Structures are given as C-alpha cells and as structure tokens.
Amino acid sequence: MQVVKYMFQPHGDDRGQLVALEEFKDIPFRVKRVYYMYDTGEGVVRGRHAHKSLEQILICIHGSCKVRLDNGKEKKVIPLEKPYEGLYVSNVMWREMFDFSPDAVLMVLASELYDESDYIRDYDAFLKYVENNSGNNAENSAENNAENGSENSAEKNAEKEGENA
Ligand code: TYD
C-alpha cells in the first residue's frame, strides 16, 4: 500500500502562514463537505470504518494525531503533525485516528455529502467488501495518477511514501 500525502504551499510572510486549498488544484476531487474534530479525549480512537465511495483528505491543522490506514491486506500508521500536510484516504480503506494531542484539530475534506449508506462500520464486512470489489477503489487510480505525472496539479503535488510510511 502506498501512502499519498499532499504537501500544500504555505504563503508565509512576516505576519505568519496561510494555506489555501482549491478543488482539483490542491485537492484531487470536488470538495462537497468539510468537518473537523477537536477536544478529542486521551486514548480515544475515532473512525473505525471505511467508505464504499467517499474520498477524503485529512489535515491536522493544529496539534498532532496518527492515522492507521488498512486496505484489507496491509496496514500503515501515518503521523499527521503539520498544518500544511494532507493525507489522502481513498474509498474502500479502513481508517482509525488516534493519539490525538490535547490541542489537535483534525480537519477532513470530503468528496461527498454525509451519507450513512456509504459507511462500512463492521471490520469483517469490510474485509468481505474488499474481497468482492477488488480493483474498484480509487486508491489505485490516485496512486497511478501521481506516478504517471497527471495533468491535475493536485496529483503533481502528491508525495507517495512507500514501505517506510
Ligand atoms: P462519526 O462518524 O462517529 O465520527 P468518526 O467516524 O470520525 O468517529 O460521527 C460522529 C457524529 O457526527 C455522528 O452522530 C454523525 C455526525 N456526523 C455528521 O452529522 N456529519 C458528518 O459529516 C460526519 C462525519 C458526522
């Protein structure tokens, strides 16, 4: 499994930093929904689900947290600790967010509106879904686009991390 991270361009000057995100330019999909979590208690694990279609970018805009990604075959833990760093999470990807610092604000940019029917909340059901839908997830296409130098500038900015992620 390759981890796709976006390093956004901070516009810094003597007043501080600013990051601007535009769909299809900095983000590889149309952003239909934004949500964020904060005041996450110590030891809490959030997420613990996958989506059939939804794609997301996770940005820890303050503090830090970790994300475990699991495509049903491999798992990786990715620390998020920079406000200019975005982690791409494809559809059909089990995710768990944990180790939140007390000041963490985790912002999520999502490709679809909230839709409970898109969730897979049971891990065994997720494994079955992976088995029955292999080749049907956006993970591969995001990786391939990043690899092949897609015209989409969001894809050009993506960094893929291999085995050491
Ligand atoms: P939940 O899915 O449990 O969050 P997480 O998976 O990150 O732990 O969502 C918590 C609550 O917020 C739940 O009642 C559903 C609601 N919610 C919305 O209303 N809209 C949204 O876009 C999201 C992500 C959650």
Image (cartoon, rainbow, N blue to C red):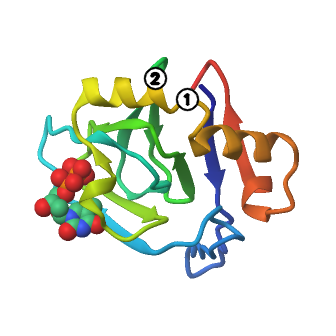
Q: Is residue 149 above or below residue 48?
A: below
Residue 41 visible in the current orientation:
yes
Dot 1 falls on a residue whose secondary structure is: loop
**Label 1 sits on what residue type?**
Ser
Crowd rating for badge 1 (residues with CA inside 10 Å; few <14, some 14–19, many 20+):
few
For this view, does 51 lie left or right of residue 143? left
Q: In this view, does 103 lie above or below 160?
A: below
In the rendered image, which residue does mark 2 sit on? 131
Residue 102 visible in the current orientation:
no
For this view, does 88 lie left or right of residue 36? right
For this view, does 62 lie left or right of residue 133? left
User: Quick one: quadrant of the N terminus?
Assistant: top right
**Label 2 sits on what residue type?**
Glu
Q: Position of residue 89 (x, y in %)?
A: 50, 46
Q: Looking at the rendering, which quadrant does residue 65 occupy?
A: top left
In the rendered image, which residue does mark 1 sit on? 134
